[in-house]
Amino acid sequence: MTAHAESSAARPESRLARKLGLFDATMLVMGGIVGSGIFINSSVVAREVHTPALILAAWITGGAIALLGGFIYAELAARLPEVGGQYAYLREAYHPAVAFLYGWGLLLVTQTGGMAAVSIVFAKYTLELGGVHAPDSLVAVLALTALTLVNCLGVRMGSTVQSTLMIIKIAAITALIVLGWALVRQSHLSWAPVFDHAPGALSAFGGALIPVLFSYGGWQTSCFIAGEMRNPARDLPRGLLIGVTGVIVLYVGTAFVYTRALGAAGLAATSTPASAVMRLALGRAGSEFMAAAIAVSALGFLSQSILTAPRVYFAMAEDGLFFKPVARVSARTRVPVVAIVLQSVWTMAIAVTGTYDQILNYVVSVDFIFFGMTATTLFVFRRRDPGGASHARVPGHPYTTAAFALACFLVVANTIYRYPQNSLIGIAILCAGVPVYLLWRRGRGRSVVEG
C-alpha cells in the first residue's frame, strides 16, 4: 500500500452530516453547471465561428467533453467518496502540494471570481426587473449574505434551496426552447457553407470552445460534498451522469433555438440572445420573463457554489494546510461555517472592488489545468486497485480518459495562445501558492515538533 493510500485508509469518518441522496446529487451537478453562461455565451461562440453548423458543433463537442469528464469523475467519486472531491483525488494520487494548489486557485481565482461575476449578473437583472436604482455591488452582497446564512443553517436546508432554484431554472430553459421553437416562425438556419475554410479556422473553433467549456464547467463541484451524502459511492456517480446528460440536452436545444431564431450573424450581433429570442416570441413580456429566469439562474448558481466549494477549504484545514478555524464544524448544524463565511466574504470583496472581470479571464486556463490533471489521477488509482469501482467504470479507458485529459490541456494551450497575458497571470497566481504551501508545511512540522 502506498503512503497516500495509507493516509486515506487512516482518515477519520467525516464530521459532517450525511443527509443528501441521488436527487440532491443530480440537482447539485446541474446547478453547478447552469449559471448565466447559456443565456449569454452563445453570442461569443457565434463571433468566433460563423456558420450554424459550427456553432452547434461547438456546443455538441463541449457536451461530449463534459460527459466524458462526468464519466471520469463518476469513477473517481466511487473510488474515493471523500469530502473535498477533486482536492482529495489530487492529494491521494499525487501529493498534498498539488491538492493545495488546486484549493488555492479555487479560493483566489476560479470559484470566487466566477461567483462575484454571477452575483453582479443577478444584481443587474434584479434591479432592472424591479425598476430600482441601487449599486449592483450592494444587491450582490445582500444576495451572497442571504445564501450564506441559509447554508450555515445546515446542508439539508442549503440543498433544498439549491434544488428548488434548479427546478425553476430547468423550467425556464425548457420554456425558452419550446416557445422559441413554436412562436418564432421564421427560421434563419442556413447550412451553407457548413465549414469555415479561412486561415485560422481551427484556432477559431478552439476559441469558440472556451466559452462553451466555461458554460459546461462545474460538474466537478458536486464531488466536494461527498462527505455529506448518505451513499456517495452509489449516488454521486449516478447524479454526475444524469446531471451532465440533462444539461447537454438543455444547452444544445437552447443553442439550436438561438441559431434558428436569430441566424449566425444575428446571434453574433447581440449580447443577450435569450432575451432577443423571447422578445421575438412574446414581445416585452418575453424579455421580462427571460430577465427573471437569468436572475433565478444566477441565484441558483451562487447557492450551489456556497453549498459545495467551502468543503474544499474545510478539507485543506483538516489536513493542516490552511487556517485551523476553517475546519471548525457547527455543533448544531454540522456544517463548516467558517469555510462557508470565508468564501462568501472573499467573493463579496471581489464583487465590491469590481475585479471579477479580470479574474474571469484567468479562470479557464487554471481550471482546465486541474481538470486534465484530475483525469490523469484515474490512471494512478486504476494501477493501485485494478478491480475497484466496478459499477462506475469509465467506458473506453484508458483511451477516453487520455482523450479527455488531452482535450483539457489543448484548451489550456489555446487559451494561453489567444490570451497570453490573462492566462499567464492566472498561472502566476497559481504558482504563488507554492511558497505558501511550503510555509504551511514548515509551520505544521514545527507545531508537531513542539507538541
Image (tube, rainbow, N blue to C red):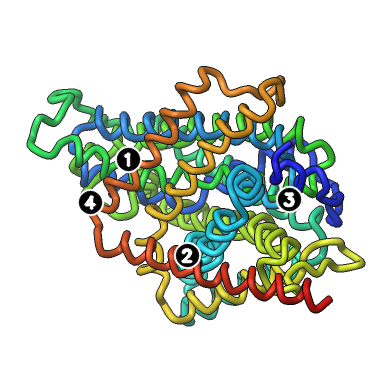
The residue under label 3 is: 83
Which amino acid type is shown beneath numbered disc 4?
Tyr
Tell me which numbered mark, 4 or 1, is placed earlier along the sequence. Answer: 1
Lateral position of residue 383 relative to residue 214, left or right: right
Distance from disc 4 to disc 3, alpha carbons, whole Å, reads: 35 Å
Q: Looking at the image, which is closer to me, 271 or 183?
A: 271
The residue under label 4 is: 417
Q: Looking at the image, which is closer to me, 5 or 282?
A: 5
Location of the C terminus by quadrant is bottom right
Do labels 4 and 2 touch, CB within 8 Å? no
Distance from disc 4 to disc 2, alpha carbons, whole Å, reads: 20 Å
Residue 129 visible, this angle: no
Tell me which numbered mark, 1 or 2, is placed earlier along the sequence. Answer: 2
In percent of width and height, residue 369 lies at 43, 48
The residue under the point 62% across, 27% down is: 382
Which label sits on residue 410? 1
In the image, residue 198 sits, relative to residue 438, either above or below, namely above
Lateral position of residue 349 relative to residue 425, left or right: right
Lateral position of residue 436 relative to residue 286, left or right: right
Q: Secondary structure at mark 3?
A: loop
Q: Residue furthest top?
A: 396
Which amino acid type is shown beneath numbered disc 1?
Leu
Which label sits on residue 14? none
